[in-house]
Amino acid sequence: MKETLTMTRASALILNTFDHLEAPIITKLTTVFPRVYSIGPLHTHVKNQVTKNPSLSLSVAKEDKSCITWLDHQREKSVIYVSFGTVVKLSEEQFLEFWHGLVNSLKPFLWVVRKDLMNEEGGFFHKNVPKELELGTEERGLLVQWAPQEEVLGHPAVGGFLTHCGWNSTVECIAEGVPMLCFPSMVDQTINSRSVSEQWGIGVDVDGTCDRFIIEKMVKDVLENRIPGLRNSVDEIAKQARDSIKETGSSTRNIESMINDILSMKEKNIEHEK
């Protein structure tokens, strides 16, 4: 709450979103802040630079790119990508339910399993893995400690993203045109999930349920395109995201406006100091 109140004293607000996605909210914010710049999806502005220089990366964690080679051998839009970010933790029961659901779906899956993903000290992998999960993962899955998420989401083999709905992950997924299976757990994730599933129609909400049968069904529904209108909505919003960063796009114009305003403020400060 303190941070929110502090924000109201800011001279400008910079948002990792784009006009078409959240127009009503952005319009409302302009009544509170003197300047509002919606310049997202942010990662797309530097994507070309990362492509030109592979040593660059936006990730804060060590990336395991072996998964890209694995994805190269999968069919188009056949893989469910699973990642719960850097903070979310699962109980052993939740972890097992997700794992059973993924294996039972009989779909290929790529799962980012951090060392500290489990609540229990030491993590699940210090215990015996059920044989059916071990075999199912060997046949159709790949578990890694981290992955180059933007590259994974942009890979042709990925057809769905099981996510915690952190905002960065949500925006990255929107830009790449991948449907989401949402499992929010904290802060703004619940609101993001509701927007994804109810407002924008580009994903489904697991609704806090860690049930292997529900996970299995939702994975199949998304990858087999069983949800009416989902694919069309995903493609439409992805196009809007791409359009926003074109030379004449809204986010590009807003960045230019932001830079001009900053330079203008700097010049005024210099004049004031003379």
Image (cartoon, rainbow, N blue to C red):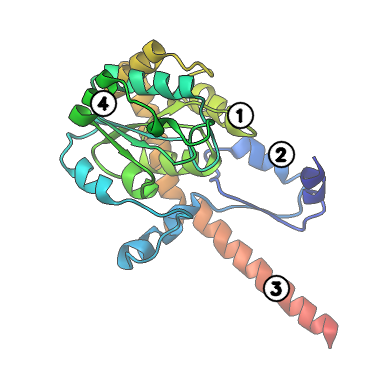
Which mark, by number, is residue 191? 1
> Along the horizontal axis of the image, is 47 left or right of 271?
left
**SS at mark 2?**
helix
Which residue sits furthest top? 213
Estimate how packed mark 2 is, as few (under 14), some (14 to 19) or many (20 or more) residues with alpha carbons within 10 Å: few
Q: Which amino acid type corresponds to the residue marked 1 in the rendered image?
A: Ile
Residue 31: image location, x then y, percent: 77, 44
> Along the horizontal axis of the image, is 33 left or right of 96?
right
Which mark, by number, is residue 250? none
For the question of whether residue 125 can be seen, the reply is yes
**Is residue 60 positioned above or below 76 on the image?**
below
Residue identifier under label 2: 28
Report, in whole angstroms, how far the alpha carbon at label 3 lies from the one at label 1.
Answer: 36 Å
Viewer-side residue, 243 vs 76: 76
**Is residue 81 positioned above or below 15 on the image?**
above
Which residue sits furthest front? 127
Tell me where residue 214 sits by quadrant: top left
